[in-house]
Amino acid sequence: MIIEGYASKFFERDLNDDVVVPWAFKASLTRTGAEGVKMLYQHGSATPVGVWDEVSEDATGLFVRGRVFDLTPEARLVQSLIRAGALDGLSIGFRTLKSRPDETRRLRVLTEVELWEVSFVTFPMLPSARLLRVREAA
């Protein structure tokens, strides 16, 4: 299964009062490329469910494109839930390297993060982080 969507969007407040700005992922992606970003289900690191072929920043946010495999029970579950429309959220796992408060001091502005993984989740911390396109592999 081939999927794509946005794992993070710039200048949008998440449910943890974080806001990501453009280029926050740049250094991390330069170091690791898409290969260094794991594809997980509900942030569970025990069993990756596929691979990210593209992880990049564009004008909207952190765009991801990848393949969900059918090699493990977890990956088959993810495929089934996506097909059924029950799973469409995306969430990032990261370590904050640089941040600052916004002008109101209510939000944390993430200016540099080390991206570890992008997970399929039921409830994304950033509600607009969703799958946009799903298609079956040929």
Image: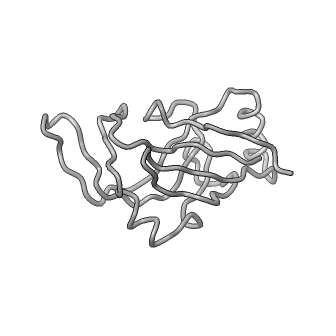
Question: In the image, what residue occupies the spot 33% across and 34% down?
Answer: 13
Q: In the displayed image of the protein, which residue is found farthest to the bottom?
A: 31
Q: In the displayed image of the protein, which residue is found farthest to the right?
A: 138
On the image, the x and y values in percent for residue 36 come to 55, 66
**Toward which corner of the image does residue 23 lie, by quadrant?**
bottom left
Question: In the image, what residue occupies the spot 32% across and 49% down?
Answer: 21
On the image, the x and y values in percent for residue 54 come to 59, 59
Give the vertical position of 84 relative to 27 (above or below).
above
Q: In the displayed image of the protein, which residue is found farthest to the front?
A: 59
Asked whether, in this view, residue 59 is left or right of residue 39, the answer is left
On the image, the x and y values in percent for residue 6 come to 52, 43
Question: In the image, what residue occupies the spot 63% across and 57% down?
Answer: 52
Q: Foreground residue, 87 or 62? A: 62
Question: In the image, what residue occupies the spot 81% across and 44% down?
Answer: 136
Give the vertical position of 107 relative to 50 (above or below).
above
Give the vertical position of 48 relative to 105 (above or below).
below
Asked whether, in this view, residue 77 is left or right of residue 110, the answer is right
Q: Which color mode does the image show?
A: one colour
Asked whether, in this view, residue 29 is left or right of residue 136, the answer is left
- Labels in figure, total: 0
On the image, the x and y values in percent for residue 40 come to 61, 50
**Toward which corner of the image does residue 74 lie, by quadrant?**
top right
